Structure formats: structure tokens, C-alpha cells
Amino acid sequence: MEDLEQAGREVHPSRTQRRLKTRDKVYAAAMAEFSRSGIAAAQIEDIVKAAGVARGTFYNHFPTKDHVLLEYVERLQRAAAGRMEELEVASARLFFRGAVEILADVVIGEDPTILREALSVVSRHVDEMENVAPLYTGVTAFFAVAQARGEIRSDLLPGELSVAFLPAVFGVLLLRLGAPESELRATLHHAVDVFVRGIAP
């Protein structure tokens, strides 16, 4: 009986699983269309046709094309945040140098046009991203640890420090996306050094 129930669960996935699968199909179709036509020219009709879903299904998952790009940024952040959990945390400088190296690894090789537009979209929807983004959560947790060790200023909340640090990093990425990889990484390291000096006690 237990085996039959398990088989039934595998044949009939839960509503949540089906919804996530549909979301992934719509997302993949949208990103492919963005790459093919450009974001501004991409048509919802073409996206839903490629995904094999109704037009309303797109809007159930993504109210606008901007929200597809927010999902894109969220996925990049999750990839980076997972790697940051393994970083050396002996000092703020080591942690943040490692963090920007990981961010560089994640974005290098991405379509620069889509990535640039996605980072711009974040600034237009910052209220939807703040306090829920994976990077925000991970970096804020590190700031709290560093403050407890007396390594950084205690007159600012960890969340406030994250709100200052992450836009600075994304700003560098936005401005230097077309630069050679070594130059991009060097600029990110300089930004880290300036920031760490500024938050030292």
C-alpha cells in the first residue's frame, strides 16, 4: 500500500511542484526570447507560445517582464550566496574580497545586455528585493558576526551596512561589465578595500 501511495505521488506531483515546473518553463522561455529579440522587443505572446502555456499563466508568475529579470537576479544571487557560505571569515577584508570574487565568477559569461538591464531593474524594484534577497541575508549575517568580534563599527545596524555595501558592488558591476575580467576584479577589490576602511572601528 505504501509503495502504491509513493507511486501515486510520483505520477501526480503536488500542486506546488507543478506550479514551480510551469514557472521554470515560462522563465526559461522568457530568457530565451530576451536573448533572441532583446528585452524591449520581446513579446509576451512569443514567450507563452514557446512555453506552451496560456497568456494568463505568464502574468500569474510574472506581472511584468521586469519580474522575469528580478527572478534572474534572484537566481544569480542564490548561486553566489551558496558559495559565500563556505568563505573564510577570519576578517572582513578576506570575506568581502572572497564575496566579490564569487560575484565576478557568477556574472562573467552572462549576456552583458541582459545582465545590465537586470541590475537596472533591481534599482526600480528595490522595495521588492530588500530584506529578502539571498545575498542581503548572507552579508547581513556576516556583518553581525564581525560586529560581535569588534572588527567593524557598532554604530550601524548590520542590515544598514548591507544596504550600503551591496548597491556599491552592483554599481561597479553595472559600470564595468564591458571591462576585461582582470580589470573588473581589480575594481571590485578596490571597492572592498575602501568600504572596509570606512567601516573599521
Image (tube, rainbow, N blue to C red):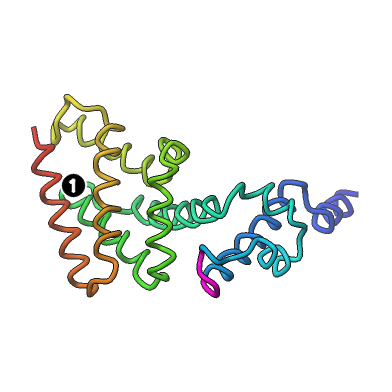
Q: Nearer the viewer, residue 122 or 163?
A: 122
**Was residue 16 drawn as part of the magenta stretch in this picture?**
no
Q: Which residues are magenta?
A: 35-39
Q: Is residue 5 above or below residue 137?
A: below
Q: Nearer the viewer, residue 87 or 16?
A: 16
Q: Residue at x 61, y 47 (%)?
A: 63
**Was residue 36 drawn as part of the magenta stretch in this picture?**
yes
Pinpoint residue 44: horizontal percent, then vertical percent. 65, 61
Pinpoint residue 128: horizontal percent, then vertical percent. 47, 38
Pinpoint residue 72: horizontal percent, then vertical percent. 49, 57
In the picture, measured across the screen, residue 52 lies left or right of residue 94, that is: right
* Quadrant in which residue 154 is drawn: top left
* Quadrant in which residue 114 is drawn: bottom left
In the picture, measured across the screen, residue 62 lies left or right of residue 145, that is: right
Name the dominant secondary structure of the magenta segment.
helix
Q: Nearer the viewer, residue 89 or 129?
A: 129
Q: Count of labels shown?
A: 1
Quadrant of the image for the C terminus? top left
Pinpoint residue 34: horizontal percent, then vertical percent. 54, 67
Q: Residue at x 29, y 46 (%)?
A: 166
In the picture, measured across the screen, residue 78 lies left or right of residue 96, that is: right
Q: Is residue 36 above or below residue 164?
A: below
Estimate how packed mark 1 is, as few (under 14), some (14 to 19) or many (20 or more) residues with alpha carbons within 10 Å: few
Q: Residue at x 68, y 54 (%)?
A: 58
The amino acid marked with disc number 1 is: Ala
Q: Residue at x 74, y 51 (%)?
A: 56
Single out the residue that lies furthest toward the front. 41
Secondary structure beneath dot 1 equals loop
Reading the image, the residue beneath label 1 is 90
